[in-house]
Amino acid sequence: MQNIQEFIDLGLSEKSIEAIKAKGFETPTEIQKRCIPVLLSGHGDLIGQAQTGTGKTAAFALPILEMIDAIPVSQRPEGPMALVLVPTRELCIQVCDEIQSLALGRKIRTSAIYGGASYNIQFRDLKAGVDVVVGTPGRIQDHIDRGTLVLNEIKVCVLDEADEMLDMGFIEDIENILSKMPE
């Protein structure tokens, strides 16, 4: 691994660097140093593991935002290009908020899709078009079944806290959701 000391060394755009600085982050964490360059390269799958509070969300969110931002708004598909599956509504809200804060200065639309929230708001967001959907497996599956969420434009899928989702019994939902995406 190259000697990465600063966020600029990771190959991130100026927009990402500005968003990171606005959040008060100064140097990348180990998970960010290891994941961001790999994810920016677009080569293959990645499994990352780190303690809570080490910046895992930024480690996957920044490359997603870079990928979406590289596509002119007029050329983006109607459906989401990234899906982040999370085990709980609390984490869903937290991850969506973090992605939105890192999207500072970009025209990237995000939506949190989780059980216990208003379907009307979720229907409206999905109909208007979103680039990144963060959601819980049950509610994502529900929207797929209703035809309000189509995953045929997904370029990146993140299973955040995959071990917890498996422990909670979401394996069938996750497998079905993954089967609705392009290879």
Image: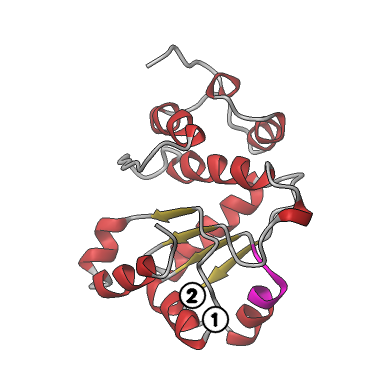
Kind of residue indicated by mark 2: Tyr
- Residue closest to the eye, 152 or 112: 152
Which percent across, then down, holds residue 159? Answer: 37, 56
Q: Residues within 10 Å of mark 2 (few under 14, many from 20)?
A: many
Q: Is 156 rendered above or below residue 168?
A: above
Mark 2 — residue?
114
- In three-dimensional space, the C-alpha distance between marks 1 and 2, rounded to whole angstroms, equals 6 Å
Secondary structure of the residue carrying tag 1 is loop
Q: Magenta stretch: dominant SS?
A: helix
Query: From the viewer's perspective, is 148 left or right of 31?
Result: right
Location of the C terminus by quadrant is bottom left
User: Do callouts 1 and 2 mark residues in contact (Cβ within 8 Å)?
Assistant: yes
Which percent across, then down, holds residue 88? Answer: 39, 68
Q: Residue at x 63, y 82 (%)?
A: 123
Q: Residue at x 64, y 38 (%)?
A: 23
Secondary structure of the residue carrying tag 2 is loop
Scheme of colours in the image: secondary structure
- Residue 132 falls in image quadrant: bottom right
Which percent across, then down, holds residue 79? Answer: 61, 67
Q: Is 1 rendered above or below residue 58?
A: above
Q: Is 123 rendered above or below residue 130?
A: below
- Residue 124 falls in image quadrant: bottom right
Q: Is 169 rendered above or below residue 26?
A: below
Task: Decide whether residue 35 is among the magenta residues.
Answer: no
Which percent across, then down, holds residue 13? Answer: 66, 30
Disc marking residue 6: none
Kind of residue indicated by mark 1: Ala
Q: Residue at x 33, y 73 (%)?
A: 176
Disc marking residue 117: 1
Q: Which residues are magenta?
A: 125-130
Location of the N terminus by quadrant is top left
